Amino acid sequence: MLEPLVEAVVSALPNAVVIFSPQGNVLAYNSKALELFGFNSMQDKSVEDLAQTCTLENGSPIASSIFVSPQANEPRRFMIRSKKTGKWILVYASPVASDGAQQGKNKVGAITIYSEKTEIVKNLSKLSRELQQKTKYQVNIEKPLLEAIKLRDDFISMASHELKTPLTSMKLQAEIVKRKHNETQLTRDQLDKLFSTWEEQLERLNSLIDGMLDVSALSEGKIKTHPCKLDLGKAIKSQVGRFYTEQISFIKKKQVIGTWDPRRIDQIVSNLLTNAIKYGHKKPIEIILDQDGNSAVIEVTDHGEGIARENFEKIFKRFERVPSDISVGGIGLGLYIVKQIVETTGGSIAVKSKKGEGSTFTVRIPLSS
C-alpha cells in the first residue's frame, strides 16, 4: 500500500493516474482513470486487466509489459485506444526503482499518467483526409500543396518540441520519487511542491492542446462564446497577476464595462503578454486600457527587438514565427488566435513597431460583442 498522502495527491491530480506494483497490481488510481477507461473501480485490478481493455494505435493487442516491465530502464510514451470508451489516450509510463537500486532490480512498479487525445486524433485524421483529397482531385495545385505539407511538417516539429518539454520536466520529477520512494523521507511540503510542478506542466500541455483545438474551431468558424457583463479592467488585472512578474505594469485610464466572453478576453490578454515577454528582452512591458467611443482599447507595449515592417502581416498567420535574435518557444499560434477572436467581436488589431525599439499591439473591441 502507498502512503495515504500520496494516494490523496494522486486522487487530486487533473489527469488520469495509475500506480502499479512490481507484480502489476494496481496500488493507486484516481477517478479520472476510471472515467477514461470505463471502470467502476480498479480495486483488485491488475495491469493485465487494463491491457485487455485497450489496443495499440495500429489496433493490435497490448502486452502488459508495455506498462510495467522489469527490463524497462527509461520512461515510455505511447498511444492506446480504450475498447470500452473508444477514446484515444496518450500514456506516459515511468518505471520506479527503490532508492539505490540498479535499473532492472528491486523495481517497485510504475507510475502511469494518461491524457485523452481523441479530439487531436480526429483533427489529424481530418487533416490527413483533406490532404489526400487535394492530392487526388487538384493535380494542378502542386505548389500550394507542397507549401501546405511543409507547413504541416514545421508545425509537427514545433508541436512535438513544445509537448516534449513539460514531459521531460515531469520525468526529472519522477526520478525524485524513485530515489525517495522507500525512504519515506518526503515531507508534505516536498510532496506538495512535487505534484504542484506536475500540475503546472500538465496545465502547460493542456494549454497547448486547447490552443490547437481553438485553431481548428476558428478556421471552421465554429468558435463558441459565452458573453456576459464584464469589468475589463478587473479581467486584465487578474490576467496580469497570473504572470508573477514585476516586468508588467497595468495602466487603466478609464473603467471600461462591456459584454464579452471572459475566457476569450483572457486569451487575448494572455497571448499578447506572452508574446511581449518572449520578445521583450526582459525589459518593462506596459498594458494600457482605455475607451474610445463605443470601443474598448487595449495596448500592449514591449521594448524588445521589434518587428520588421515586411513581417507585420506574417505574424498573424497560423504557425508563423518571424526570425528572432533570441531562441523562443511556441508554435506560432498566439497572435493568430488573438486576431481571430478579436475579429469575431467585430473588432480589430494593429501593430506598430520599429526594429530594435520594441512593439505596440493595439486591440479595439466593441463594448458589446
Image (cartoon, helix red, strand yellow):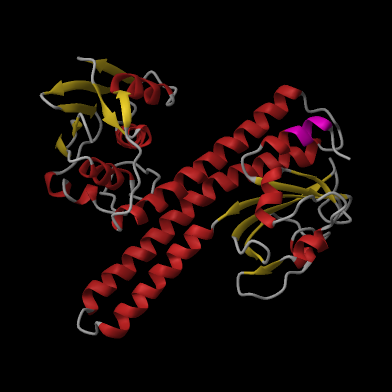
Q: Position of residue 240 (x, y in %)?
A: 37, 23
Q: Position of residue 81 (x, y in %)?
A: 63, 65
Residue numbers of the magenta segment: 4-8
**Which residue is at 68% across, 35% downward?**
12
Q: Position of residue 353 (x, y in %)?
A: 15, 35
Q: How many marks?
A: 0
**Which residue is at 76% across, 64% downward?**
51
Residue 200 is left or right of residue 104, and the answer is: left
Residue placed furthest toward the left: 293
Asked whether the viewer can see residue 282, the reply is yes
Residue 62 is left or right of residue 299, and the answer is: right
**Magenta stretch encompasses residue 173:** no
Name the quadrant containing residue 91: bottom right
Residue 259 is left or right of residue 158, and the answer is: left
Name the quadrant containing residue 2: top right
Vertical side of 184 occupied by 218: above or below: below
Magenta segment, principal secondary structure?
Answer: helix
Vertical side of 279 occupied by 157: above or below: below
Name the quadrant containing residue 342: top left
Residue 212 is left or right of residue 232, and the answer is: right
**Which residue is at 35% across, 73% downward?**
130
Asked whether the viewer can see residue 284, the reply is no
Q: Quadrant of the C terminus?
A: top left
Q: Position of residue 265 (x, y in %)?
A: 32, 33
**Which residue is at 67% across, 39% downward?**
173
Q: Nearer the viewer, residue 285 or 350?
A: 350
Q: Quadrant of the N terminus?
A: top right
Q: Nearer the viewer, residue 234 or 132?
A: 234
